Amino acid sequence: MQALPAAPLVCSAQTPAKRRSFRFSGMNPAPRIRERQDSTVNTQASRQVLTTSAIRKIEASFAASTPSLMQRAGLAAAAFASRIAAPEGPILVLVGPGNNGGDGLVLATELKRMGRTVVVALAGDADKLPPDASEALRRWHEAGGTLRDSVPSLPWALAVDALLGIGLTRPVTGLIAEWITDFNRLRCPRLAIDVPSGLDADTGAIHGIAARATHTISFIALKPGLLTLEGPDQAGDLQLSDLELPTDAISEAGRWIAPADFTEFAGPRRLNSHKGHFGDAGIIGGQAGMVGAAWIAGRAALALGSGRVFVGCLAPDAPAIDPLTPELMMRSANEVHSLASALAIGPGLGQDEAANVHLSRALAFRGPLVLDADALNLLGANPSMHTALSLRTDATVMTPHPAEAARLLQCSTAQVQAQRLEAAKEIAGRYRAHVVLKGCGSIIADPQGAWAINRSGNPGMASAGMGDALTGFVVSLLGQHWPAGAALEAAVHLHGAAADALAVGKTGPIGLTASEVIHAARRVRNGWAEAALTEAA
């Protein structure tokens, strides 16, 4: 595929964004479920996510270190390669013309020293390698290694992609593109060094063609592009080697989310509790033909522990009771505005005059507010509402998918997807809100510019009602007095973790429904409470 254009996120304010149809794409594939359980150590440092510019700053600071960064990376990669390679057979290493190729040459030399048969193919001119890579090539020759200029057809124990590293900004063409195609066809473990070649390390976009690895070992810190958009499909199972370099001084670092982030708020409840302690969640939406969206959000709020849930449907003939969840308190939308301690508006809201009236009123709500679905579409189409939103003093949470984000930013969905991190940060800053840009590797940003990426979830979540369930989770935690940032991150992670638990039990990913995820989320949430109690003890 062609690289998406690096166009600015914001188009002319005078040209309203056209409404586009949007199909929610699948989240991280099921194999990543096992990886999340047993790979990267769950510490704040190892969960950092750094952009290319941040990585370059660290590399520059340690350029003269001994051993060199290339030696450290190559040796770490070789140790990992030795664990995932088949026990018998040769190992193929595809080497590119830059420092990523140098990492591959160090790996090849070390694997040869271990007694493995290693074949190295170089895509480029050996005389034009950067200094460190040229030194790595000298050591490869010194160890008795030779170079190929084509990819031999053999039954490989492992194939290693060391063609292109971070910083790629243009489409991959020519010989390297051909070799990536050959690499992707190999029926053996396929290891990418730092990032799969052809994948944008910052955005997860594919520049023409990208290596599709079964494993990726990344260095110093994980990169956003490994965790969002196309990255999870291309990278396979992730391994991190920090090369023993400190990264805690990097102010622009993000992180990937883990339950340890919520221990402070996720503990068990006091025995002396009543429903008034756990908030009154309000849901407004449910236009004609879309009542189910509001009900799903309400059911999700109940399952996550709200004391009471009020649902105000705009459909004139909306039932007075949810037959599957009679605990939901059906009220008029007008009543819900005044009854809720935390309010969500959008699931099934529609875009008629009544929807506009209720959204305007919601923007003046005194308490935490969640904006989803058509509430976001209306906001994007009505700049006059932006002032009301900017005047809010209570927390605002926004949960757009890429098409809704495009309407908020007055740009195309393709532009949002090509710059997911920047899009999420811009929405958060512009609307002074906590934002999740949903999709594969959902990105969460706050008004101050902090950001995180969620790794939980699977393709089963690409079904109707999942976004409504997430809205219910968020408003429930807000009503239970969770801070907005923690509530949003916990709800997003819990949403995906519940879907993952169902997939492990073979209820999904194919055919997974929002209702099933709601019930699974309750089990996961109670598991968090038990874990917090154990940790406290």
Image (cartoon, grey):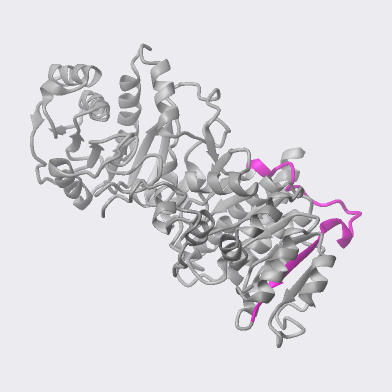
The vertical placement of 384 against 218, above or below, is below
Quadrant location, the C terminus? top right
Query: Between residues 353 and 362, which one lies in front from this camera angle?
Result: 353
Query: Between residues 55 and 421, which one lies in front from this camera angle?
Result: 421
Q: Can I make out residue 328 in this image? A: no
Q: Position of residue 502 (x, y in %)?
A: 54, 63
Residue at x 80%, y 73% (from the top left corner) = 334
Residue at x 41%, y 38% (from the top left corner) = 239
Q: Is residue 29 left or right of residue 464?
A: left
Q: Can I make out residue 497 in this image? A: yes
Q: Is residue 393 left or right of residue 57?
A: right
* Chain part drawn in magenta: 260-287
* Farthest-out residue, right: 272
Number of marks present in the image shown: 0
The vertical placement of 1 against 326, above or below, is above
The vertical placement of 35 against 287, above or below, is above
Q: Position of residue 109 (x, y in %)?
A: 21, 24
The vertical placement of 57 against 187, above or below, is above
* Farthest-out residue, front: 14
**Residue 108, quarter of picture:** top left
Magenta stretch encompasses residue 270: yes
Quadrant location, the N terminus? bottom left
* Farthest-out residue, bottom: 317
Residue at x 62%, y 65% (from the top left corner) = 375
Q: Is residue 6 left or right of residue 455?
A: left
Residue at x 84%, y 66% (from the top left corner) = 338
**Residue 365, quarter of picture:** bottom right
Magenta stretch encompasses residue 57: no
Q: Position of residue 397 (x, y in %)?
A: 66, 53
Q: Position of residue 211 (x, y in %)?
A: 26, 46
